[in-house]
Amino acid sequence: MNWDNIKLIWQREMRDQLRDRRTLFVIGVLPLLIYPMMGIAFSRLSQFVRQNTARIAVVGYEQLDSVENLPPLLEDGGFSKKLFEITGLSDRMKVEQIDGSEIALASQKERMRSGKTDVVVYFPPGFADRLKEMQRAMREPGEFESGESLPNPPNPVVYYDIRDQSQLANSRVQILLDRWQSQIVRSNLIAGRIPIEVTRPFRVEEENIATVSGKQAAFWAKLLPFIVFICALTGAFYPAVDLCAGEKERGTLETLLTSPAQRSEIVGGKLLTVITFSIGSAVCNLASMAITGQLIIKQINAMGVVGQEPLAAPSLASIAWLLAALLPMAVLFSAMSLALASLARSTKEGQYYLMPLFLVCMPLMMLPLMPGIELNLPTSLVPISGMVLLMQSAMEGKLGEVALYALPVAIVTFGCCAAAVRWAVDQFNQESVLFRDTENFDLVTWIRYAYRHRPEVPKLPAAAILIALIFMAQFFAQSLSVDLTAADGLIKMVLYSQLFCILAPTLLVAWLAARNWKKTFLLANRVSTIGFLNILIGFALAVAMQPVGTAMIEAIDQIVPLPAALLELMKQLKELEHQMEFSIWTILLLMAVLPAICEELAFRGVVLSGLRSRLNPFWAVVISAIFFGLAHASALQQTISAGILGLLLGFIAIKTQQITACVAFHMGYNGLQLLRTSFAESLKVQPWAGWVFRPSSAPAVELGYTTTMVILGGVTAMALLALLWQVGLSKNRSAETYGLQEDARSLMPSAAPPEQSRP
């Protein structure tokens, strides 16, 4: 890769973009204008909200004039000013007192429906008599027996509708009525010479020990990363569309592709341009928010609640953390935008691709805003969300968490960046992607053509479709109600999860996307000694990996414990197994044999074959292992352990080129785990159990292995993997030799057939 070429392409693209007035307006000028306009609009609207007056009708209040020593609710044509904590708020509530009757109440309801009144407060007949009865009970307690309760009173009713102004007025009226009720209780207690503290023997005092700066940092940590990363995403997409689809429309992309620069260098130059505009857009938005924010902060502080600290601007350290995280996020968003934009045949079509990108990125950026989501090992491994959570911890001053989880967040973020850049380079290396035809698309014709001209083995789109179908089937299978207490409940659950969710989509995709099922599913053409040896090695490797896998589960459980709901489900399943008295062969068939066949056909068959059609074996194995782990998503612990075993299964598939070895390992590994769990009590009393087993602290592991067995299993597994490597090499050499011999036979002149005598 020549960096001079990348620099030249970057300079060329920057000049073209800077000449485009629309791009400059959207990226640079619009952020500087929109936030001041929003600030002015916010200021005007806040004034309108403060000046808003609630219109309240009070019906039937005149009956309360006969109640002695009653704290007033209405005074001087409005609510009593003693009920308000903020001076001047009583002037924003216009009260109209109306004599109580059913006709008057119906009339006020009609006025409220037409929007002339916001809230109607109705005191029904008999409410004043109820208050008098309570006052008499406090002054003359001897007339009432101990524990006797007064009859249910006719309570006041507050009517409101769905309008926002009506609901806001209702909330204010409810607060005033609660305070008025407290004043009545206080007055009655004083009349009965009872201490006021009787109704409230103690009061809980709250004290937030967080500093003012810490509260300010927590507020900005929730808001700023989301806004800045959204600006970086939008700032990356529109230049990417112009650099790809725009050049196609202008006819300049062909000229660039005929230059001496390599495709990777062209992508590098365009990517640097998109990154520049992405960072520039985020910085411009951040600067404009800083300028406009001063006005908005003043408005918020002016409308603030008594007792709350005024809002202050974010610290310079918070801004520095945001700028540090902006670079990797801009690289990720720019590479994804460039790869998607390369698919577009026109600028209009490219803009349609913005919505799928937003649908993927927005939930990941909004997830950290949800309450209860904190930075830990599982959340740090989520793309985009981990970076947002890391920025929140850094802005809040939790540097210990930042130091602890910075490495996993960096690994995931830069790994996603590398994958996105690789995707963009692959898109530019395909002429069929860059120069697609623009004819009309007919779905039925395309399906017929794709089926008739399907390749020998599945391609990458087929693998992606299968993964999507499996996840969709698993999602819809969750809605199927299976009674686990029934005799066939466990059997139905396993059959649904394996046959419906995995095997059926696998066979459907293989039928539509591949002609040669033997190559797709790595089925051997003939029985051979090497094939049997591979199966034996796969099963032996499963035996050797038992102690290692169990120790791995225990280690993962220390970091990511199993959820309580899953532990309860495992306990119920174990009890069901004992109650229904399943034979061990039935359990092995359901839990070991069936999953091994279905999952290997899917992930080491169609998925791995499709990934290998576009990727090298290493990345094909890694990606298939990731989705294999995600398919076991009942718990994060199971996802991690299944993903690690998926790497091993992919290695076996690549080296042996036969799926039977993978099935043997999968079946043996699951089966041995089930046997150890089912016969745990019997194994504990064996005389040799102390050398092999030990009690386990992990709830998912009833019986662990000793350190000696873990080391012995690890060494044996390494030896078997080395043997598998050699078997794979010898098999490849044999295949190459056989291919050379076939080529040699094809080059040799064929012997003329003997002439047959005619009768």
Image: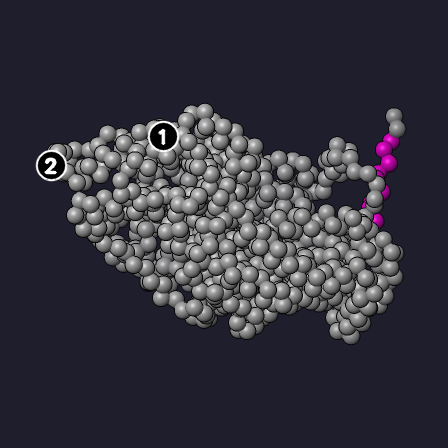
Q: Which residue is mark 1?
A: 124
Would residue 46 be found to the left or right of residue 169 on screen?
right
Write the residue at 80% across / 64% down.
17
Instruction: Specify the amino acid type for callout 2.
Output: Gly
Q: Which mark is residue 421?
A: none
Q: Secondary structure at mark 1?
A: loop
Residue found at x 63% / y 60%: 39
Bin the neighbour count of mark 2 within 10 Å (Cα to Cα): few under 14, some 14-19, many 20 and up.
few
Q: Check the image and tell me how it is coloured.
A: one colour
Query: Which corner quadrant of the image does residue 688 belong to?
Result: bottom left
Residue lying at 44% horizontally and 37% vertically, measured from the top left: 97
The stretch of residues the image draws in magenta is 745-757
- Looking at this view, is 462 or 757 the one in front? 462
Image-quadrant location for residue 29? bottom right
Q: x, y (%) of residue 176?
A: 39, 46
Q: Amino acid at mark 1?
A: Pro
Place of residue 49 in the rendered image (x, y in percent of width and height, measured from the top left)? 55, 51
Crowd class of label 1 (few under 14; some 14 to 19; many from 20; radius 10 Å): many
**Which quarter of the figure has residue 678?**
top left
668, above or below 335, in the image: above
Q: Secondary structure at mark 2?
A: helix
Instruction: Classify 747 as above or below 65.
Output: below
Residue 225, magenta (yes or no): no
